[in-house]
Image (cartoon, grey):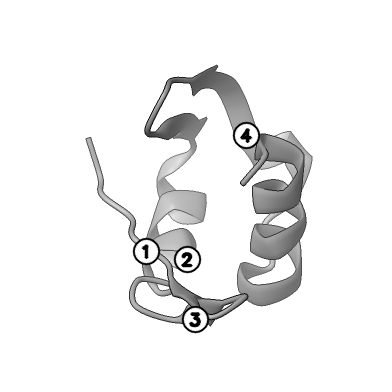
Amino acid sequence: MRAVSLIDLFKKEADLYSGNVGDITIGDKKTVFQLNKGASNRILQLEGKKYKNKSIKLRKL
């Protein structure tokens, strides 16, 4: 899943806007977003929900 698609999902499901997102690091198996504290708490509520028949896996670093 591309970072742009993830941000769109976060915007739709967790009321997150691109202004709350800092640096984005894209790796082979994971994408890391730097978020402010309030935004990260909203994002973590998406853990386990389904997107295109796949479970969303999130972790706070």
| Residue type beneath disc 4 | Val
**Amino acid type assigned to the residue bearing label 2 in the image:** Arg
Q: Residue at x 75, y 71 (%)?
A: 12
Contact (Cβ within 8 Å) of mark 1 with mark 2 = yes
Label 3: few (<14), some (14–19) or many (≥20) C-alpha neighbours in 10 Å: few
Label 3 to label 2, Cα distance in Å?
A: 16 Å
Q: Amino acid at mark 1?
A: Leu
Q: Decide which of 6, 22 is in the foreground and name it.
A: 6
Instruction: Of the two numbered discs 2 and 4 on the same chain, state the one appearing first in sequence.
Output: 4
Q: N-terminal of the two: label 3 or label 4?
A: 4
Disc with the residue nearer the chain's start (4 vs 1): 4
x and y percentages locating residue 54 in the rendered image = 47, 73
Identify the element where label 3 is drawn.
strand
Measured in 3D between alpha carbons, the distance from the residue under mark 3 to the one under mark 1, in whole angstroms, is: 13 Å
Residue sitting at x 26%, y 49%: 59
Q: On the picture, is 23 further left or further right than 15?
A: left
Label 4, residues with CA under 10 Å away: few <14, some 14-19, many ≥20: some
Mark 3 in CB contact with mark 2 (< 8 angstroms): no
Above or below, 51 against 20 in this view is below
Residue placed under numbered mark 3 in the picture: 50
Mark sitting on residue 42: 2
* Kind of residue sitting beneath label 3: Lys
The reply to whether dot 3 and dot 4 touch (C-beta < 8 Å) is no
User: Residue beneath label 4, please?
Assistant: 21
Mark 3 → mark 4, Cα distance in angstroms: 22 Å
Check disc 1 and report the residue beneath it.
44
> Could you say whether the residue bearing mark 1 is in a helix, strand or loop?
helix
Along the horizontal axis of the image, is 55 left or right of 8?
left
Horizontal side of residue 4 vs 60, given as left or right = right
